[in-house]
Image (spheres, rainbow, N blue to C red):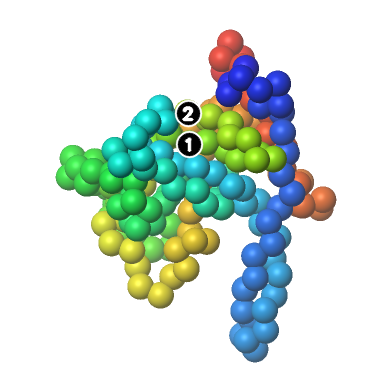
Amino acid sequence: MKGGFRNSEKFGFKYHTDLFKNEKGERIPIKRPRIEVVFRKYSEKTNPDTNPEFRAFALVDSGSDVCYIPKQIADILKLERNEENKKESIGVGKKIWTYRTKVYLEIVNKGRRIGVDMVEVAFPEKDPEGIELDINILLGRKGLFTNYEITFNDLSGYMLFKHIQKDNR
């Protein structure tokens, strides 16, 4: 059992409502599979000066290979920019240069943190101008989907996470 909690085996989330402006400037609510998470450079929670964390809402994205965080979050987490791990990434029709590394991911459910694993993340060489950074955090398949079977139910606006036992992978 991950995290030591019985509820970490199976848990769910209601979709989060994001507000967007349409072409008339009206704010339109859109429900999305967004959950609260915590990112840390290392798995152990030690000194916040050497292992800072960042808590945010992130979009669970089955179409993304890896997790994506903005450069500003990578700076807060003090992630290294290793040129050997620099790759061209494609997202929403644009190509950008990103650095790849691993961070520790926790899911926040009902106020409790559930440890997931070290997951691969990509972060850009520089944040694009004019984008809302807080809605551009993506949870991709590598790491999250290898630890959890995730069921999306758009009709009810609910997603269910079921921990995959190591012997069932």
| Residue 62 % position (x, y) | 57, 44
The quadrant holding residue 161 is top right
Q: Residue at x 65, y 30 (%)?
A: 149
Q: Residue at x 40, y 39 (%)?
A: 40
The quadrant the N terminus occupies is top right
The quadrant holding residue 111 is top right
Q: Residue at x 42, y 31 (%)?
A: 45
In the displayed image of the protein, which residue is found farthest to the right?
A: 156
Does residue 34 appear to the left or right of 156 in the view shown? left
- Packing grade of label 2 (10 A; few <14, some 14-19, many >=20) is some
Does residue 128 appear to the left or right of 158 in the view shown? left
| Residue 105 % position (x, y) | 48, 36
Q: Residues under labels 2 and 1: Cα distance?
A: 6 Å
Asked if one can make out residue 90 in the rendered structure from this viewpoint, the answer is: no
Does residue 156 appear to the left or right of 102 in the view shown? right
Asked if one can make out residue 80 in the rendered structure from this viewpoint, the answer is: yes
Q: Is residue 138 above or below residue 48?
A: below
The residue nearer to you, when weighing 95 against 77, is 77
Find residue 149 and name its label.
none
Does residue 41 appear to the left or right of 64 in the view shown? left
In the displayed image of the protein, which residue is found farthest to the bottom?
A: 24
For mark 2, give the secondary structure. strand
Tag 2 near tag 1, CB within 8 Å: yes
Which residue carries the number 1 mark?
Answer: 105
The quadrant the C terminus occupies is top right
In the displayed image of the protein, which residue is found farthest to the top?
A: 167
| Residue 130 % position (x, y) | 40, 75
The residue nearer to you, when weighing 161 against 38, is 38
For mark 1, give the secondary structure. strand
Find residue 117 and name its label.
2
The tag earlier along the polypeptide, 2 or 1, is 1
